[in-house]
Image (cartoon, helix red, strand yellow):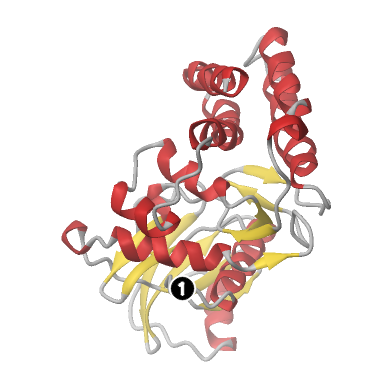
Amino acid sequence: MNDVLMSLLETHDIVPLGELNPLSGGDIASVSRLDTDHGPVVVKHDDAERLEGEADGLQALRDAGSSLRVPVVLAVADGWLIMEALESSGPRRRDDAALGEGLRKLHSVVGDTHGWPRNNACGLTPQPNEPMADGRAFQRERRLLPMAMACHERGLMAASLRERIERVADDLERWLEDVPASLIHGDLWSGNVLFTPEGPAVIDPAVYCHYPDVDLAMLTLFGSPGDTFFEAYWNGRRPDDWSVREALFQLYPLLNHLLLFGGAYRGAVERAVACVETG
């Protein structure tokens, strides 16, 4: 076992009871499970700043007091993150209503501004979070325009598509209301939701304060949590313009996927842009 990791375990009085067992899904960080005298833990090894941002986000989600389970961070330093391992109860114990209720409670926590005191990362992509008072300006200046420019500079989109995204970003004040900035998970795709014996849990956050639609749109991007989830989240009050809002807030993660994984996502970006344009 790595000497730095052993020193970190010792500093936090965590005694390993075996060897690291690699886990699947560690495309960004090295992820392993380790049995300890504190119970099973997850050990991540990656860029130190990225892991510190993840630990900061996990603590913020725990401090929010939502009913969603969040792993306890046991130690973070020198490119290592050690946290509580959560046990999945499997698909038969899936509770979409509890997930919807827990996410609604999380989003009821609001900040003074849109953004976060520190930058973090969405996957491998650095995520700028310098706060702004207006959520529409934040979405434009911190999310859509930088990502569209990055994709264009790498030859992943034509200038015409970049210009369409710029027009969408410039037009937000016309139709999107400004709202108090909710605490959001920030990368809430289905792989970052676990259903444990104690209830739904969330992992791997990219936390900041912004429109709650960010989390909802990410959940539906590569699947759907289903009607039970939305009934619990919205209490039967689905926004009339949800399809347009969904497309808008899917645009940033789609651009991120285009940047990371290439042209296979260009069509999805174009469809999202067209939905907002015609909304």
39 vs 253, nearest the viewer: 253
**Compared with residue 16, is residue 106 higher up or lower down, i.e. above or below?**
above
Q: Quadrant of the N terminus?
A: bottom left
**Compared with residue 111, is residue 141 higher up or lower down, i.e. above or below?**
above
Percent from the top left, x then y, of residue 190? Answer: 38, 49
**Residue drawn 73% across the image and 47% down it:** 178
Specify the quadrant of the image occupied by residue 39. bottom left
Q: Is residue 49 left or right of residue 5?
A: right
**Residue drawn 33% across the image and 78% down it:** 18
94 vs 54, nearest the viewer: 94
Provide the residue designation for mark 1: 71
Percent from the top left, x then y, of residue 65? Answer: 53, 78
Residue 22 in view here? no
Residue type (three-letter) at the residue carrying disc 1:
Pro
**Residue drawn 58% across the image and 17% down it:** 278
Q: Is residue 165 left or right of residue 204?
A: right
270 vs 109, nearest the viewer: 109
Q: Is residue 14 left or right of residue 228?
A: right
